[in-house]
Amino acid sequence: MTWAELYSEAARPTLEEIDAYAHTPLWPQLRAYLAAAYGAGPRLEYSRCGLEPGWNVKFRRGSKSLCTVYLRPGFVTAMVSVAPKDEEAAQMVLLTCTAETQAVYHRSAASKMGRWLMLDITSPEMLEDVKALLAVRVKPAE
């Protein structure tokens, strides 16, 4: 059963249910990093988006969006945006990222609003890639 099928708009999941569905230590590590580096806690929101319907988890620092996390069975996907003004810095960071992250970046379409990178956090290296790309968008406090 998909995440959207398990939790309808009327059935808001708990953080424990999210943890159980993601079933990976990388998800709590991402949350802990976002809290420590940005003071950002998880905020659950329901999306009716045709591509990613259902409950997702958003992280913000003040008015600045950091990332949106989508639940998958056994892992999470972080959507990180790269603004047009940050393209050059992001390309420098990509030199240190995994081949998988580089491929996602190059497959994503650039637009006036930037690029939206859907990064599957399935390894510690992918988690580090997400952290590095987030730092391009918003400098961490640590």
Image (tube, helix red, strand yellow):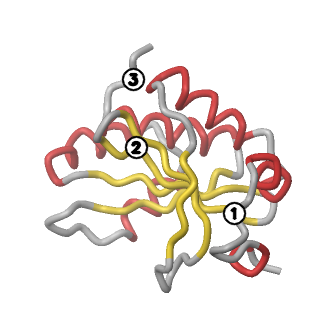
| Furthest-top residue in this view | 142
The residue pinned by badge 1 equals 12
Nearer the camera: disc 1 or disc 3: 1
Amino acid on which disc 3 is placed: Pro
Alpha carbons under labels 3 and 2: distance apart: 11 Å
| Furthest-front residue in this view | 10
Amino acid on which disc 2 is placed: Leu
Q: Which disc is residue 4 wearing?
A: none
Residue under the image location 60 percent in, 45 percent down: 126
Residue under the image location 42 percent in, 52 percent down: 80
- Tell me where residue 133 appears, x and y as whole percent: 40, 41
**Is 90 in front, or is 81?**
81
Q: Is residue 139 left or right of residue 125?
A: left
SS category of the residue bearing label 2: strand
Mark 1 touching mark 2, by CB under 8 A?
no
User: Which of the 4 quarters of the picture holds residue 134?
Assistant: top left
Q: How many residues crowd around disc 1 within 10 Å: few (fewer than 14), some, or many (20 or more)?
A: some
Residue under the image location 23 percent in, 60 percent down: 114
Quarter holding the N terminus? bottom right
SS category of the residue bearing label 3: loop
- Tell me where residue 33 appears, x and y as whole percent: 58, 28
The residue pinned by badge 2 equals 66
The residue pinned by badge 3 equals 140
Q: Earlier in the sequence, mark 1 or mark 2?
A: 1
Q: Is residue 124 above or below residue 69?
A: above
Amino acid on which disc 1 is placed: Arg
Residue under the image location 60 percent in, 73 percent down: 54
Alpha carbons under labels 1 and 3: distance apart: 30 Å
**Is 5 in front, or is 100?**
5
Alpha carbons under labels 1 and 2: distance apart: 22 Å
